């Protein structure tokens, strides 16, 4: 598999001098889902945001398709990547159709192309275009909004999808539905996905690689099976923090 | 009453138009300065406090004094209407500036973040996202400014700029309440009409669902 994203010794420090990323090196294969795990403040989101230059590393390099992102036109770079966040960030003044196709609108693509694309995308994320295209974000449930967010991220047919805890705010059942939908969709579309999450289950279910960060350092980069088997203390303590209820009742 | 109207009717109409012209010119000028300035302040928030403070101070100058200050300035002092328009502009700046700034700052950061991450240019971000989302705020500022200016414009008559204040000043000088009312009532109607019209526009731009 060719490399889609490569982090080379990427560090990032805030203006106050706090080190959020500490010399992270990592390669992400094209067409795979990589989950970035870690507790809050471990640098997961910051690492993801260096890919579309929402964060510029203080040192080191990020390469996409072997080209350093720092040398690319920032607008073109971002339009070539899907971006989904937990709060969705749907535009409240736009209809769902316009939300989904905003990137195409920004590129001045013709109206009929945008309408067609919006139909395809809404169908792909499991929303009926006939009833959803003309609605507004406030008329949708949390899960539906997240579907729209995903459709919007796919609009410009990006090769890379950046997802920052996309399902973190959803109830467990809706979250499970969304995970199934994403899994199906990604197995068909073959996108390279960076998925930031703190949910171990989600990472195991969706990803083919699991990266664990702690205090800005890369602790592990393993397949889900190896991750579960690992005896590395940081991994063990991360895993043991999940399913505590079940374990307690089993004992 | 009908005798009074036949005597002053056409004068009232002319002065109302003059009043309208002074106020609209000032509002256009103020909007042209304050909206871009408000946008600029959201890009350089360090400047927001000092700039808004200056606009605030302008607001506190008594209007009669403001007209007086401007009178000796060359070119400006040549025509009373110029003074009136400039003074009214100064009063209109603060509400528009403050609301533009606050309206854009009030937008959910997640929305701005996504807009940038999707690859919108600064221009597209401004015109497709920030201004439409802040529109009802900005219009509310314009509304406050307009109503204030319609009122203050009556004082412009003191420097000979005309407008409905002319009738009021004349009525006060000659102790004729009918003349005072002939100036005050149309001025109040103008203010209410402007308030209602801008209010409708403001509702039109309010977010769906709010």
Image (cartoon, rainbow, N blue to C red):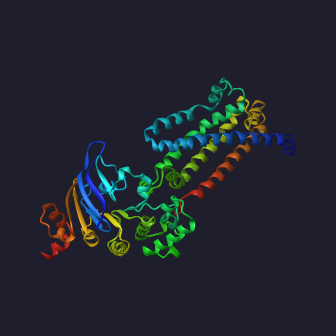
Q: Which residue is depicted at the point 50% across and 42% down?
A: B40
Relative to residue B35, is residue A163 depicted above or below?
Answer: below
Nearer the observer, B136 or A50: A50
Q: Is residue A141 left or right of residue A60?
A: right
Residue B196 horizontal side relative to residue A111, left or right: right
Q: How many marks?
A: 0
Is A15 above or below relative to A213? above
A110 relative to B59, above or below: below
Viewer can see residue B20? yes
Q: Nearer the viewer, residue A202 or A33?
A: A33
The answer to which quarter of the image holds residue A134 is bottom right
Q: In which quarter of the image is the C terminus of chain A?
A: bottom left
Figure quadrant of residue B176? top right
| Rendering coords of residue A115 (x, y %) | 54, 69
Q: Position of residue B9 (x, y in %)?
A: 83, 43
Task: Specify the quadrant that holds the N terminus of chain A.
Answer: bottom left
Q: Position of residue A184 (x, y in %)?
A: 35, 76
């Amino acid at each position: 598999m060719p490399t889609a994203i490569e982090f080379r010794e990427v560090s990032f420090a805030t203006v106050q001098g706090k080190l959020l990323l500490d010399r992270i090196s990592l390669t992400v294969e094209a067409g795979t889902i990589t989950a970035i795990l870690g507790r809050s403040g471990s640098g997961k989101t910051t690492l993801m945001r260096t890919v579309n230059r929402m964060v510029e590393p203080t040192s080191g390099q990020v390469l996409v398709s072997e080209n350093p992102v720092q040398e690319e036109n920032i607008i073109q770079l971002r339009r070539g990547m899907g971006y989904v966040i937990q709060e969705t960030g749907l535009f409240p003044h736009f209809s769902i159709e316009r939300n989904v196709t905003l990137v195409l609108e920004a590129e001045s693509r013709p109206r009929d192309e945008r309408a067609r694309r919006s139909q395809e995308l809404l169908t792909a994320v499991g929303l009926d275009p006939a009833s959803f295209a003309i609605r507004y974000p406030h008329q949708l449930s949390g899960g539906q909004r997240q579907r729209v967010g995903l459709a919007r991220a796919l609009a410009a047919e990006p090769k890379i999808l950046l997802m920052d805890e996309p399902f973190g705010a959803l109830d467990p059942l809706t979250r499970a539905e969304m995970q199934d939908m994403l899994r199906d969709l990604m197995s068909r579309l073959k996108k390279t996905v960076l998925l930031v999450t703190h949910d171990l289950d989600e990472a195991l279910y969706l990803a083919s690689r699991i990266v664990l960060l702690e205090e800005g350092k890369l602790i592990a980069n393993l397949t889900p099976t190896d991750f579960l088997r690992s005896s590395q203390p940081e991994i063990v303590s991360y895993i043991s923090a999940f399913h505590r209820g079940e374990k307690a009742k089993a004992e | 009453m009908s005798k009074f109207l036949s005597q002053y009717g056409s004068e009232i109409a002319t002065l109302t138009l003059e009043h309208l012209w002074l106020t609209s010119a000032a509002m256009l000028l103020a909007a042209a300065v304050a909206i871009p300035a408000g946008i600029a302040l959201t890009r350089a928030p360090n400047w927001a406090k000092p700039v808004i403070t200056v606009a605030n101070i302008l607001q506190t100058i008594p209007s009669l004094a403001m007209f007086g200050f401007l009178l000796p300035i060359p070119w400006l002092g040549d025509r009373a209407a110029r003074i009136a328009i400039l003074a009214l502009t100064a009063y209109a700046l603060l509400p528009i500036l403050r609301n533009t700034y606050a309206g854009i700052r009030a937008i959910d950061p997640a929305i701005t973040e996504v807009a940038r991450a999707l690859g919108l240019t600064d221009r597209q971000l401004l015109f497709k996202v920030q201004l439409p989302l802040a529109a009802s705020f900005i219009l509310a500022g314009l509304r406050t400014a307009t109503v204030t200016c319609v009122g203050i414009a009556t004082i412009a008559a003191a420097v000979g700029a005309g407008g409905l204040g002319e009738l009021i000043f004349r009525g006060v000088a000659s102790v004729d309440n009918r003349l005072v009312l002939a100036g005050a009532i149309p001025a109040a109607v103008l203010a209410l009409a402007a308030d209602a019209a801008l209010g409708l526009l403001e509702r039109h731009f309010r977010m769906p669902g709010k």
